[in-house]
Amino acid sequence: MQSAAEEPELGLADSLDPDARTGFLASTLAELGKVVWPSRQQLFSESVAVILMVALSAAAIAAIDRFYGWLSNLVFR
């Protein structure tokens, strides 16, 4: 087993190696090939669900804020 002091240090020249870049690109494309992409209908319906949940959350936060604002005006008038 090698200690940390014995391991070779990778410098800028090593990261610019064309074989290293090609290997990285090939492995990245291979991983992207494993991704299960959503259908257009699934993407649309989930996007609508997210937008609705954000709108409902914003409305709930605004309602609570207005209520506490109204309440504080009554108390600290």
Image: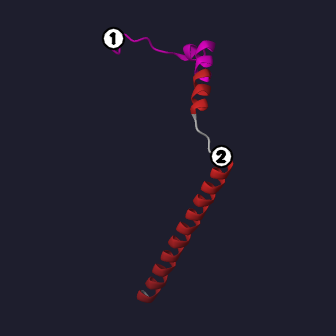
Assign a secondary structure to mark 2.
Answer: loop
Q: Which residues are magenta?
A: 1-25
User: How would you rate the neighbour count of disc 2 (Cα within 10 Å): few for under 14, some for 14-19, many for 20 or more?
Assistant: few
Q: Is 66 positioned to the left or the right of 7 in the image?
A: right
Assign a secondary structure to mark 1.
Answer: loop
Question: Does label 2 or label 1 sit earlier along the sequence?
Answer: 1
Q: Which residue does the image show at 52% across and 16% down from the upper left? A: 11
Q: Which residue does the image show at 61% across and 30% down from the upper left? A: 33
Residue, far right: 40
Q: Is residue 16 a member of the stretch shown in magenta?
A: yes
Question: Tell me, what colour scheme is on the image?
Answer: secondary structure
Residue 22 vs residue 27, the one in the foreground: 27
Residue 47 vs residue 6, the one in the foreground: 47
Image: 14 above or below 38: above
Disc nearest the viewer among 2 and 1: 2
Q: Is 3 positioned to the left or the right of 65 in the image?
A: left
Whole-percent x, y for residue 20 in the image: 58, 16
Whole-percent x, y for residue 14 in the image: 55, 13
Whole-percent x, y for residue 43 in the image: 64, 50
Mark number for residue 39?
A: 2
Q: Amino acid at mark 1?
A: Gln
Q: Amino acid at mark 2?
A: Ser
Tell me which corner region of the image, top left, top right, bottom left or bottom right, holds residue 77: bottom left
Tell me which corner region of the image, top left, top right, bottom left or bottom right, holds residue 21: top right
Q: CA distance from mark 2 to mark 1?
A: 49 Å
Q: For mark 1, what is the residue?
A: 2
Whole-percent x, y for residue 22 in the image: 63, 17
Numbered label tally: 2
Mark number for residue 65?
A: none
- Mark 2 and 1 residues: CB-CB less than 8 Å, in contact? no
Q: Which residue does the image show at 48% across and 76% down from the upper left? A: 64
Q: Is residue 54 a member of the stretch shown in magenta?
A: no
